[in-house]
Amino acid sequence: MKKGLLLFFVFTYLTTAAQDETVKKLKGEADRNIKKEADTSGKVWRKGGIYGINISQGSLSNWAAGGDNFSLSVNSLLNLFAFYKKEKHSWDNTFDFNLGYVNTTSLGSRKNDDRFDLLSKYGYALNPKLNVAGLFNLRSQFFKGYIFPDNVKTYSSDFMAPGYLLLSAGLDYKPTKNLSIFFSPATARWVIVRDTALSNKGLYGVEPGKKSALEFGGFATINYLKEFNKNVTYKGRLDLFSNYRNKPQNIDVFMSNILSAKLGKVLAVTWSLDIIYDDDVRLFGSGKNSPGTQIKSLVGLGLQVKF
């Protein structure tokens, strides 16, 4: 009887001690998880970017910024982003810069393509998927550009010639974390041609001799960013603008696509496709005074770094 009581008390003590250790362990894991979630939720900024330099094979069609129809080039690409999110406030910022140099046997070595694009969008949440938002966009290039009709070098563009400055207020719909659809029925867009030689020709929709033109219309932009896995990413953007004051049915289109696949730590293959249509860019056709769909495609292999 005494042995039985002794065994009972020993068993009870060991069971209670084991339960206390289990409870302490579970409590410690719960505290760590709560702390980890709190740290994650407190992170209001998400920043990063990609830089790549590639040897590319490119094709251009009616490209107003200048370049050959077919080329082998060294092309660099810089994409930066900074996204802010706290409570009902959000602020999305992106900066894209492309620069390429081409070498051809017929026309020598020269700049092939150059473009920068700064986009900033502030939003206030009406519900989890819909924001009222304001948008700012600046798009141009840094260096001079040339087109080569019939192998004749013709000056066509420069820094802020043209430049596109856009201010817009509207609604921003985000059905998923990868997709954003912004729409505004009231958008102001300035077309800037600061170069006197180009403005005197009345290019890009600016009256001859003037350096800018104000357009008012409807605007929509769709942005999609998807990481299929740690090696394959896609970034796409489609901008649509209708000028209420002049041929609103002729919608301006700006579309960019970048598909990137990493082959190692720093080696990657990249395909980019840009499509532009602007009824006011009349540099094409037999008389070099007609609009045209501008297409640029580049396939490259080179180095890529994420940060």
Image (cartoon, rainbow, N blue to C red):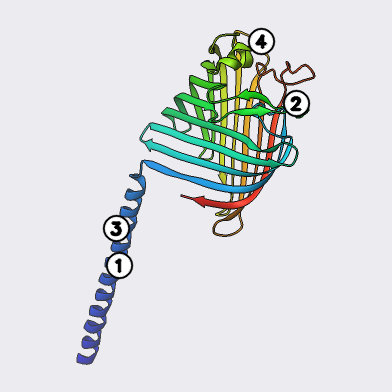
Q: Nearer the viewer, residue 82 or 289?
A: 289
Q: Earlier in the sequence, mark 4 or mark 2?
A: 2
Q: Nearer the viewer, mark 4 or mark 3?
A: 4
Q: Which residue type carries mark 2?
A: Pro
Q: CA distance from mark 4 to mark 1?
A: 71 Å
Q: Which residue is mark 4?
A: 247
Q: Position of residue 64 (x, y in %)?
A: 66, 26
Q: Amino acid at mark 1?
A: Lys
Residue on which the image places disc 1: 25
Which of disc 1 and disc 2 is earlier in sequence? 1
Tell me the tag on residue 149: 2
What distance separates the C-alpha of mark 4 from that of mark 2? 28 Å
Tell me the kind of residue under disc 4.
Lys
Quadrant of the rendered structure where residue 127 is? Answer: top left
Q: Does label 4 or label 3 sit earlier along the sequence?
A: 3
Which x, y percent locates residue 250? 68, 16
Q: Earlier in the sequence, mark 2 or mark 3?
A: 3
Q: CA distance from mark 4 to mark 3?
A: 63 Å
Label 2 with label 1: CB-CB less than 8 Å: no
Q: Which mark is residue 31?
A: 3
Asked whether the beta carbons under mark 4 and mark 1 sit within 8 Å of each other, the answer is: no
Q: Secondary structure at mark 2?
A: helix
Q: Residues within 10 Å of mark 1 (few under 14, many from 20)?
A: few
Q: Residue furthest right?
A: 286
Find residue 129 and name its label: none
Q: What residue lies at 36% left-to-right and 48% top-to-bottom?
A: 40
**Amino acid type for the residue under numbered disc 3:** Asp
Position of 173 relative to 303 (above/below): above
